Amino acid sequence: MQRRRASHKCEGMSLRSILIHPDPRLKTVADPVGEFSADLRRLADDMLETMYNAPGIGLAAPQIGVLKRLFVMDCVKEEGATPQPMILINPEVSWLSDEMNTYEEGCLSIPEQFADVERPAEARISWQDVDGKQHEEQFDGLWATCVQHEIDHLDGKLFIDYLKPLKRQMITRKMQKLKREKARA
Ligand code: NI
């Protein structure tokens, strides 16, 4: 997800380029992570660096062209608060609340476009960390929205897929124009 504020820098990691919609890789169901190697840790660190730099609050591997089931997020919003970077590998939704919540969502693969999306207000998620260790936690507020948005990316789904077709087509056309401009620059 995209965040509306200035970026900050980390060191010792490298930035990956973020795919812009439309791209077939953003519509692909990603494969489970099977090997918990040093390469996986580096990938996750690069994703965090890329996310913070964007700046964003979540980034899924398919958004940098890696079709694996992992994402990173940090939904700490308050300026100056301690960052809370999270790496979720092979995430699974184990429970969703009946209560719904609406957030104005954005996406680093659909820059500068924001729209209201309604999702379950709470989500219980299980996942593995970079060492393959299993975790489970219940998320609410922006965190719950973010985990659902990012898990959607692993299933080839974007937040604009929840919008009315006309609005979705309008955003897609804007992104096609943006990509043509970038290609020319
Ligand atoms: Ni996104």
Image (spheres, rainbow, N blue to C red):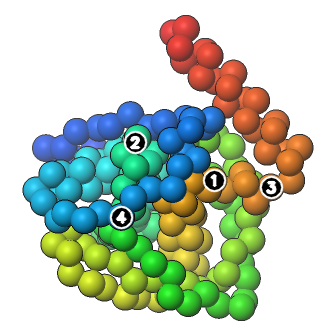
| Residue at mark 4 | 32
Q: Amino acid at mark 2?
A: Ile
Mark 1 vs 2, N-terminal side: 2
In three-dimensional space, the C-alpha distance between marks 3 and 1, rounded to whole angstroms, equals: 10 Å
In the rendered structure, the answer to whether residue 144 lies left or right of residue 18 reads: right
Q: Amino acid at mark 1?
A: Leu
Q: Amino acid at mark 3?
A: Leu
| Residue at mark 1 | 158
Q: Is mark 1 within 8 Å of ligand 1?
A: yes
> 174 or 64, which lies in front?
64
In three-dimensional space, the C-alpha distance between marks 2 and 4, rounded to whole angstroms, equals: 16 Å
Crowdedness near tag 1: few (<14), some (14–19) or many (≥20) residues, C-alpha within 10 Å? many
Label for residue 163? 3
| Residue at mark 2 | 64
Instruction: Report the residue at 51% width, 81% height from top.
Output: 93
Up-down: is 142 above or below 155?
A: below
In three-dimensional space, the C-alpha distance between marks 3 and 2, rounded to whole angstroms, equals: 24 Å
Crowdedness near tag 3: few (<14), some (14–19) or many (≥20) residues, C-alpha within 10 Å? some
Instruction: Report the residue at 27% width, 84% height from top.
Output: 134
Q: Is mark 2 within 8 Å of ligand 1?
A: no
In three-dimensional space, the C-alpha distance between marks 1 and 2, rounded to whole angstroms, equals: 14 Å
In three-dimensional space, the C-alpha distance between marks 1 and 4, rounded to whole angstroms, equals: 19 Å
Q: Amino acid at mark 4?
A: Pro
In the rendered structure, the answer to whether residue 106 lies left or right of residue 132 reads: right
Residue 85 visible here: no
Mark 3 vs 4, N-terminal side: 4
